[in-house]
Amino acid sequence: MNLNGKVAVVTGGSRDIGRAIAIELASQGARVVVNYLNSEAEAKTTVATIVEAGGTALAVNADVSSLEAIGQLKDAVQEAYGDTIDILVNNAGGLFARKTLENFDETFYDLVMGVNFKSAVFVTQAFASMLSKGSTVINISSQAARDGGGGGSALYSASKGALTTFTRAMAKELGPKGIRVNAVCPGLIATKFHDDFTTDTIREKVAAATPLRREGQAQEVAELVAYLASDAASFINGNNIDINGGLAFS
C-alpha cells in the first residue's frame, strides 16, 4: 500500500478515527492535510506525530459544514501542495447529543446533518476539480446507516444513511473520470465518541454480541482506509464496507 507522492486531505483528522487515518496514510508515504474545527491541540499532536515519524503533514482549521470555510480549506491545500490531490477522506462528523424525535429542533437538525452529510457533499464538490484519474474519495459512514443506530441517534443515523447513498451516486458520477468513491462503515470502535455518548453497559453488551467479542480499534479502520486509497483497491468502487467484527453484514 505504497502512497508515496500522494496528497491526502482528511476532514476531522485531529483525533480518534480521523487521527488514525491521517497517521496511517502518512506512514504509507502520503502528504496529509489534517483538517480540524475545535480540536487545535489534538490536530497539532497529530501533525507532530506524523512529522516525528518522518512524514509530512499540515493542520488546517475549517468548519466543513460552511461553504465559505470549505473554500478556505481548499485554498490552504493548494497553497501547500499544489492543484492536485489524490485522496479525500470525508471523516468529519458527530452525534452531539442523543435526542428522540420529540426533542428535535431545527438547530439540532442543521447541526447534525451539516457536519455529517452536508460537509461531505460540498467538500467533495470543492475538491472534485483537484482529483484526477487514479484518485479516490473515501467517506466515513457508520453501521448506524444500516440499522438505525442506538437510542437517540435517529438524525445521526439518517445523515450516515444519506452518506452511503451519496457514495454510490458519486461512484457512478466520478467513476468515468477514473475516480473511485467508497465508504467505510464502522461499528463499535473504541473512541471518544463512545466514551461521550455510549454507556459502559451498552458497550459491553454490544461487544459481547459481536462474533469477535470485542470493540474495534481506530487503527483497524485506518488500515482499511489506507487499503482503499491504494492501487491495490483499484477496481473497488461504490462500496460501503462494513468493519464491525461481524455484528452486521450484507
Image (cartoon, rainbow, N blue to C red):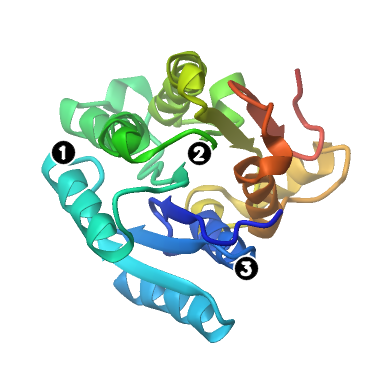
Q: Give how far across and how far down residue 72 sits, in percent.
A: 16, 52
Which structural element holds mark 3? helix
Residue 97 located left or right of residue 186? left
Q: Residues within 10 Å of mark 3 (few under 14, many from 20)?
A: many
The residue lying at 37 percent from left, 42 percent from top is 97
Dots 1 and 3: beta carbons under 8 Å? no
Circle number at residue 135: 2
Q: CA distance from mark 1 to mark 3?
A: 31 Å
Residue tagged by mark 3?
A: 27
Q: Is residue 75 above or below residue 242?
A: below
Residue 22 visible? The answer is yes
The residue lying at 29 percent from left, 50 percent from top is 83
Q: Amino acid at mark 2?
A: Ser
Q: Is residue 53 above or below residue 246?
A: below
Q: Earlier in the sequence, mark 1 or mark 2?
A: 1
Q: Is residue 245 above or below residue 117?
A: below
Q: Earlier in the sequence, mark 3 or mark 2?
A: 3
Q: Give how far across and how far down residue 34 sits, in percent.
A: 39, 62
Give 186 or 224, whichever is nearer the viewer: 224
The residue lying at 42 percent from left, 31 percent from top is 156
Residue 232 located left or right of residue 197? right
Q: Give how far across and how far down residue 238 sits, in percent.
A: 58, 21
Q: Give how far across and how far down residue 181 sits, in percent.
A: 52, 28
Circle number at residue 67: 1
Which structural element holds mark 2? loop
Q: Amino acid at mark 3?
A: Ser
